[in-house]
Image: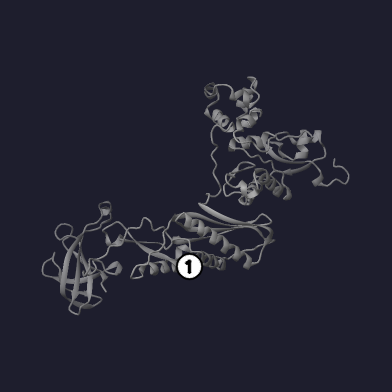
Amino acid sequence: MRKAGAKPAELPLVLTEKVKGATRLAAVSRDALAIGLSPGMTLADARARIPDLWVEEADPVAEADLLQRMAEDCDRFTPVVAIDPPNGLMLDITGCEHLFDGEAELRRSFSERFHRAGLHVRTVIANSAGAARALARHGRIAIVPPGGDEAAVRSLPIVALELDEDDRIAISRAGLKIIAHLADRPSLAFAARFGEVMTLRLSRTLGREETPMIPLRPAPMLWVERRFPEPIGRSEDVEAVLAELGQEAAERLGERREGGRTFEASFFRADGAVRRISVETGRSIRNVKVVLRLFRERLDALADPLDPGFGFDLIRLAVPETEPLDAIQAGLDGRAIEEDEIADLADRLATRFGADRVMRFVAQDTHDPDRAVHEVPAGCNTKDDIPWGRPESGEPPSRPVQVFDPPQPVETTAEVPDGPPLQFTWRRVMHRVKRAEGPERIAPEWWRRGEGAQTRDYYRIEDSEGRRFWLFRAGIYDRETNAPRWYLHGLFP
């Protein structure tokens, strides 16, 4: 029976789930816990003790979504946030506490933020993640002093190790009730009886071994941010803040003689929503004007415009990827400045139209002309690119600029089957050969011989009218074929 006039929000809340055909409590509120209810209890038993309950069915999907949104919001406290299923979060606040005037103020700000959202959270700050996790779930300490992890967790019950139920019962029956009872005994006996998992969890809880954290997002190499007592929402204010952050990031990159390949702006709304916008560059830069121009391009191209809602109370500019960068040295021919301007144009086009729609060619480590060039996004990392071959001074290029894919067949007349042509017909036009240079024999790559590829003899040919062609004969006469075919592969300028 519900008390007359009682509203659901005023009643003890329990979440239920089906376990082997029985309806059991999956989670209980603080009020329900205070009056003797606990997870695992059957709903019938709970109603027998407390008839007046607010009962809801547990929704694991919605709970996971809530935890994900909480983790996104926690990024305002530190960029290293990890989810600790089923209902926990781990934050690495190393180097962040000074932004909040110390650990105590950081913990207070964190707790108050979620309390205002109607969520009850237990927060613990410790040196090791394992100790903080155990104390948050089973302890009463809020902030552990440096070096005090083991002393803080020794009085916790064995259940804090979260062992299998059978192992927990076996340890309890042996009279070992708290973590101190295990910490004071040799670990070899426990490992032999319960396995290495038990000793590993004990070591991590005591802070003797680090607990691995898998953050939702990799920690950036560098980041700068601005917090606002009153949220901002005007686009002019947002752009001005981005400009300030860009200048600060550029100064720090300059001190480290580095530049950024990726820049990410995070906009934290007052209601907890987070919007992230990133831009990538084809080379390492720290030019503030260029970065801001790329962000404007990205913002203008967004299908879902940036909505400030009730305003942004935090804006962060992160540089997830950096590379060494020295000042551009302009040569006498001005090519360094020209190449930088071309790269800037490619970055702007890629930001506006998408990285996969602005491509460039890179050389491949192969002698096969059909595979000598590969197409990649313009912003792809260039550190491992193979340099393009350059002809010797005064020599014509060994490869044509225009190449046909696939090569086009031609009809030829030659003095001998394995010699250069005297004339050839291409697109119904006969060309008389005036000069021929070659052959340049290119064999197929041995691991591709199964595809039916033949050896090619390439010739650079000039006709009587001064036009230059790149022809090849496919197949060695009397060894690979009795009737070699000729193809036009490219045109020289």
Looking at the picture, how far across and down is residue 15, in whole percent?
Answer: 72, 41
Looking at the image, which residue sits at the far right? 4
Looking at the picture, how far across and down is residue 225, in whole percent?
Answer: 59, 56
Q: Quick check: 37 above or below 436?
A: above
Looking at the picture, how far across and down is residue 180, in whole percent?
Answer: 62, 25
Q: Quick check: 126 above or below 480?
A: above
Looking at the image, which residue sits at the far left? 415
Amino acid type at mark 1: Arg
Observer-nearest residue: 263 or 194?
263
Please indicate whether residue 330 sits to the left or right of residue 247 in the image: left
Observer-nearest residue: 193 or 363?
363
Please indicate whether residue 480 sits to the left or right of residue 270 in the image: left
Q: Quick check: 216 above or below 208?
A: below
Looking at the picture, how far across and down is residue 94, in whole percent?
Answer: 57, 44
The residue lying at 65 percent from left, 35 percent from top is 135
The residue lying at 30 percent from left, 56 percent from top is 365
- Can you say which quadrant of the picture contains the C terminus? bottom left
Observer-nearest residue: 471 or 239?
239
* Residue 272, image quadrant: bottom right
Residue at the disc numbered 1: 348
- Can you say which quadrant of the picture contains the N terminus? top right
* Residue 31, image quadrant: top right
Please indicate whether residue 11 sits to the left or right of residue 460 in the image: right
